[in-house]
Image (spheres, helix red, strand yellow):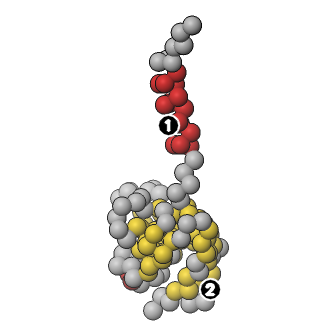
Amino acid sequence: MRIRTAGCVPGLFTFLVVVTGCSDNSLSEVTGTVSVNGQPAEKGSISFIPADGKAQTTGGEIKEGKYSVKVPPGMAKVQIRIPVVDGKKKLYNTPDSPVQDTLKEVLPEKYNNKTELLFDVQPGKNEKNWDLKNK
């Protein structure tokens, strides 16, 4: 009796690729709070940028002072942005143009564009609270 296995190998390979691609255990969970001058940040965003540049940048939303993000383990530069509405502007130069809010950043650049914030993300669950000053 002869057993044919050649047809099974491509199917097994596809199965392994799909199974390993579906569960990414390489990301850690980072949760915490963000406050500005002791007050919870109402809305904003937080980004984790791998310091070695070898992994993907990840980030998430800050809501009512809290965030939760899946992040690759390792040292990361952290950017935090807390925009607030500071006015309105017309979308078009017409009398009946709709308007939209204009935003300004509350935090100094040392927390976002020129961040000085670092966090060493460990495998598994991490908690990091950020109490920032806007002056």
- Left/right placement of residue 10 relative to residue 38 reads left
Circle 2 crowding by C-alpha within 10 Å: few under 14, some 14–19, many from 20: few
**Residue 134 at what x, y percent from top left?**
48, 88
Residue at (47% x, 81% y) in the render: 106
Q: Nearer the viewer, residue 8 or 37?
A: 8
Q: Nearer the viewer, residue 40 or 56?
A: 56
**Residue 20 at what x, y percent from top left?**
53, 43
Q: Given this view, does label 2 or label 1 mark the residue nearer the observer?
A: 1
- Quarter of the rendering occupied by the C terminus: bottom left
**Residue 79 appears anywhere in the view:** no
Circle 1 crowding by C-alpha within 10 Å: few under 14, some 14–19, many from 20: few
**Amino acid type at image mark 1:** Val
Q: Secondary structure at mark 1?
A: helix
**Amino acid type at image mark 2:** Gln
Residue at (57% x, 47% y) in the render: 23
Q: Image height check: is 59 above or below 76?
A: above
Q: Image height check: is 122 above or below 98?
A: below
Q: Which residue is mark 2?
A: 39
- Left/right placement of residue 58 relative to residue 37 reads left
Disc 2 and disc 1: Cα gap in Å? 46 Å
Q: Image height check: is 71 above or below 21?
A: below
Residue reaching furthest front? 1
Q: Nearer the viewer, residue 98 or 125?
A: 125
Going from N to C along the chain, the mark reached first, 2 or 1, is 1
- Quarter of the rendering occupied by the N terminus: top right
**Residue 43 appears anywhere in the view:** yes
Q: Nearer the viewer, residue 52 or 66?
A: 52
Q: Secondary structure at mark 2?
A: strand
Tell me, yes or no, whether the two marked residues, 2 and 1, touch with CB atoms within 8 Å: no
Q: How many labels, in total? A: 2
Indicate which disc residue 17 carries: 1
**Residue 85 at what x, y percent from top left?**
51, 74
